[in-house]
Amino acid sequence: MPLPPIPKSWQPTLRHETEQPYYEALAEFVDAERAAHEVCPPKDEVFTALELTSKRAVKALILGQDPYPTPGVAHGLAFSVRPGKPIPASLRNIFKELVADLGVPAPTDGSLVPWAEHGVLLLNAVLTVRAGAPNSHKNKGWERFTDAVIRAVNEKSTRVAFIFWGAYAQKKIPLVDTERHAVITGAHPSPLTRGKGFFGTRPFSRANAALEAAGVKPIDWRLD
């Protein structure tokens, strides 16, 4: 099987997806891509987001598009980079807003593993990419699978803060029960937006306020 097994805590929820013909076709596509090209992230890190954040633990979901296509950078968490790697421009903007919003120390490293361990599901809509070719694995089946993940999180009875940055992510809002959960939107943190519509949106404090209002312990967003 060219795709690793679904992390154990998610298997009851997602087993149905892995039994569908589209998932088999997706697995075959990714296998063929790995045979012919370098694919990011490595096979054993494709499901890192699900590995580090169980469905039961999810308090917030941040949706990205697809992994960084530079070899050695992506490690299975949306917007995150491996420890010690240069911080990409989008993530620098996220950190600027984090500091402005919460007054926490500026992160010096681009790994978001602590967020994942504190209940933030850092999910990309597409979980693999050919090295050097952004969006090369879109429309191959990943979106159907990650939509199922979003629906599974939406089924939680406790409130979750869904953070959707940019038009691409905001297309997923119909998958969320906005009566039970919080949906927090803003422009994408990409440098192309120059922060317009992103800076000042205070997504982190808004997420925590929404959680606390529903009796859910807030997220510790500090990275240092």
Image (tube, rainbow, N blue to C red):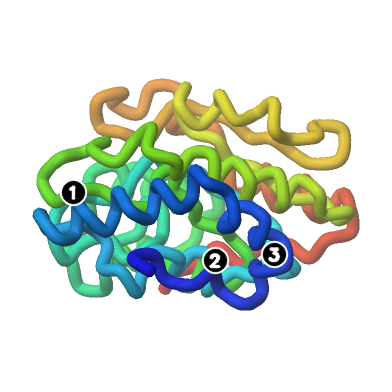
Question: Which dot marks residue 55?
Answer: 3
Question: Distance between the Cα atoms at labels 1 and 3?
Answer: 28 Å
| Amino acid type indicated by mark 3 | Lys
Q: Can you identify the residue that label 1 sits on? A: 130
Decide which of 139, 187 is in the foreground and name it: 139
Q: Tell me the quarter of the picture where residue 193 sits.
A: top left
Is residue 77 shown above or below 161? below
Give the left or right position of residue 212, taking residue 203 as reference. right
Is residue 220 shown above or below 102? below
- Crowding at dot 2, Cα within 10 Å, few <14 / some 14-19 / many 20+, comes out as many
Question: Distance between the Cα atoms at labels 2 and 1?
Answer: 21 Å
Give the left or right position of residue 153, taking residue 23 as reference. right
Question: Distance between the Cα atoms at labels 3 and 2?
Answer: 8 Å
Closer mark to the observer between disc 1 and disc 3: 1
Q: Secondary structure at mark 2?
A: helix
* Quadrant into which the N terminus falls: bottom left
Question: Which dot marks residue 50?
Answer: 2
- Crowding at dot 3, Cα within 10 Å, few <14 / some 14-19 / many 20+, comes out as some
Q: Secondary structure at mark 3?
A: loop
Where is residue 157 drawn, in percent x and y? 88, 54
Count of number-bearing discs:
3
Outermost residue toward the front in this view: 21
Q: Tell me the quarter of the picture where residue 156 sits.
A: bottom right
Q: Contact, CB < 8 Å: mark 3 with mark 2?
A: no
Q: Tell me the quarter of the picture where residue 203 sits.
A: top right
**Dot placed on the residue nearer the N-terminal end, 3 or 2:** 2
| Amino acid type indicated by mark 1 | Arg
Where is residue 213 drawn, in percent x and y? 87, 49
**Dot placed on the residue nearer the N-terminal end, 1 or 3:** 3
